Image (tube, grey):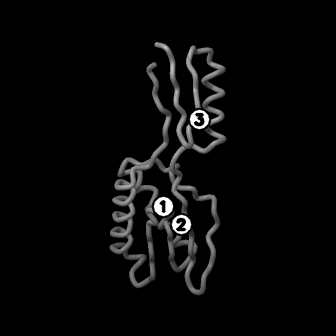
Amino acid sequence: MPSFDIVSKVDLQTLDNAINTVKKEINNRYDFKGSPVEIDLDKKDMIVKLEVETDMKLDQVIDVLISRSMRQGLAAEIYDLSKEHYVSGKVVKKEVPVRNGIKQDDAKKIVKMIKDSGLKVQAAIMDDIVRVTGKK
């Protein structure tokens, strides 16, 4: 039986390239000269760790991160920016999780939409993917 998968995966190498481009641009910018800026990608947990001096600089780093990621071909929605930043000593820190895969709620909505469409196919949720199979 023919089938196809509905998947939302982030290419780790492209994400790493985008993070390296952001680091290079931040190091070359005049308004960041002499200020401590740390941008790290935790490849295991898929989290981007940001550490800057002020809230304003944090917003600028996030803006550069999103724009450079989009130039690399990544969608801006892969970053979960809902988590708040926190102050640690003299620096502001923020952990930005990278969305990888389809959440269970979204997968259920996709399956419901497929079933409501009336097509003669079956949709099944398999971890973070949705597999659609049919006779033709």
Q: Secondary structure at mark 1?
A: helix
Q: Position of residue 71 (x, y in %)?
A: 36, 51
Task: Choose the circle earlier in sequence order: 3 or 2.
Answer: 2
Q: Within the image, what quadrant is residue 64 found in?
A: bottom left
Question: Disc number at residue 24?
Answer: none
Identity of the residue drawn at 57% across and 56% down: 80
Three-letter amino acid code at the position of disc 3: Ile
Question: What crowding class fits label 1: few (fewer than 14 Cα within 10 Å), some (14-19), or many (20 or more)?
Answer: few
77 above or below 131?
below
Three-letter amino acid code at the position of disc 1: Asp
Badges 2 and 1: C-beta atoms under 8 Å apart?
yes
Q: From the viewer's perspective, is 73 left or right of 90?
A: left
Q: Which residue is mark 3?
A: 125
Q: From the viewer's perspective, is 66 left or right of 123?
A: left
Identity of the residue drawn at 45% across and 75% down: 38
Q: Position of residue 20 (x, y in %)?
A: 35, 65
Identity of the residue drawn at 44% across and 62% down: 43
Identity of the residue drawn at 35% across and 51% down: 72
Q: Which residue is mark 2?
A: 59
Question: What crowding class fits label 3: few (fewer than 14 Cα within 10 Å), some (14-19), or many (20 or more)?
Answer: some
Q: Secondary structure at mark 2?
A: helix
Question: Disc number at residue 63?
Answer: 1
**Separation of disc 2 and disc 1 at Cα?**
6 Å
Q: Position of residue 52 (x, y in %)?
A: 51, 77
